[in-house]
Amino acid sequence: MQEFICQTRIVMGNGAVNALSEGKFSRLFVVADPFFSKNGWAERVGRQAKEYEIFDHITPDPSVELVAEGMEKLHAFKPDAIVALGGGSAMDCAKAIACFSEGKLPLIAIPTTSGSGSEVTDFAILTHRGVKHPLIDPKMRPEMAILEEELLRELPRTLIADCGFDILAHALEAWVGKNANPFTDALVQSAVAAALELLPASYEGDRSVRLELHIASTMAALAFNQAGLGLCHALSHALGGQFHIPHGRLNAVLLPAVLGHNNVPKYAALSRNLGLGGGSDMLALRNLKNALVRLRNRLKLPDTLAAAGVDLQLLRTKSEEIITAALADPCCETNPIPVTAELVRQVLWEVAGRG
């Protein structure tokens, strides 16, 4: 039996944030990246209700301690809804606060980057003692996702590039995830096509394509929330916890290699559906990998861990610890082929590069 569930109301376009002022919520607890507290957006979101409080202590790779601090402030304020405003770190923090708080507070997500897709998923990532721990709980699935076009106007090029490969990693792992179905396949194909076509234009400053990429990110997330992820994300989480490199940047390094090792015929079908061609499955898969490599180069993303800033001596020292963390990651459970220590090791050293 297969199923597809989407419980999140998705509002998109210019002025979408005004959906918060419909009167459903009177006290909002706004979990926001510090940047959006400083530029007034957190206050703008909060003013959609009668009363609000802003929690803006968000740091990259949010920790268990940060979530505990947010929960303390939330319990003191007693809101009737939580709003997450920002990138993946703000989303993860807000979702963890919602998950661990008593009762079930409605969660509204306003993503400001086009990559994590956290606005429609049951997933969050917390870091504890240098290890990233994926959390999965339906309580963390937002009730509403607001895709506000105005927030996409001033995006740094590096952020567009990093987040773009997050879209692709979510979509391409969902395509072969063990729980994939015709609905997730349709979302994946649309998301990958949009990312391959539009990321270069967005990277070069074309704002007109950014809402479409924002929607593609949400589509990819709807797909992986149902179909599952795989080795690319498991290893990216393990490496990110050790080296604190942006998640999407690690995905850019890992994704072509992981596709090659998974080597399932379904990737060849996607390659042909996208117009990349390939007379044999091997050639079609190679064409898909080459399309990713070309895009990675165009977005000036690193092609090895060394180029991404990883100390290779430290990587050698920590390699078995990283492999163990990757194997323990729940994303491995839906990888299309069994994930073994030897497979993780092969991928890790294939992408390590030279220092």
Image: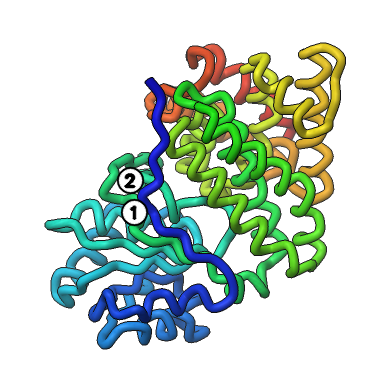
For label 1, the residue is: 63
Determine the secondary structure under disc 1: loop
Q: Residue at x 85, y 25 (%)?
A: 277
- The answer to whether 104 appears left or right of 282 in the picture is left
Q: Nearer the viewer, residue 279 or 9?
A: 9
- The answer to whether 196 appears left or right of 248 in the picture is right
Disc 2 packing (10 Å; few <14; some 14–19; many ≥20): some
Disc 1 packing (10 Å; few <14; some 14–19; many ≥20): many
| Quadrant location, the C terminus | top right
Looking at the image, is 339 positioned above or below residue 98? above
For label 2, the residue is: 128
Q: Give the image's coloring scheme.
A: rainbow
> How far apart are the two marked residues, 2 and 1, measured between alpha carbons?
6 Å
Measured as percent of width and height from the top left, residue 47 is found at 36, 86
Q: Nearer the viewer, residue 53 or 313?
A: 53
Measured as percent of width and height from the top left, residue 210 is found at 68, 63
Marks 2/1 in contact by CB < 8 Å: the verdict is yes
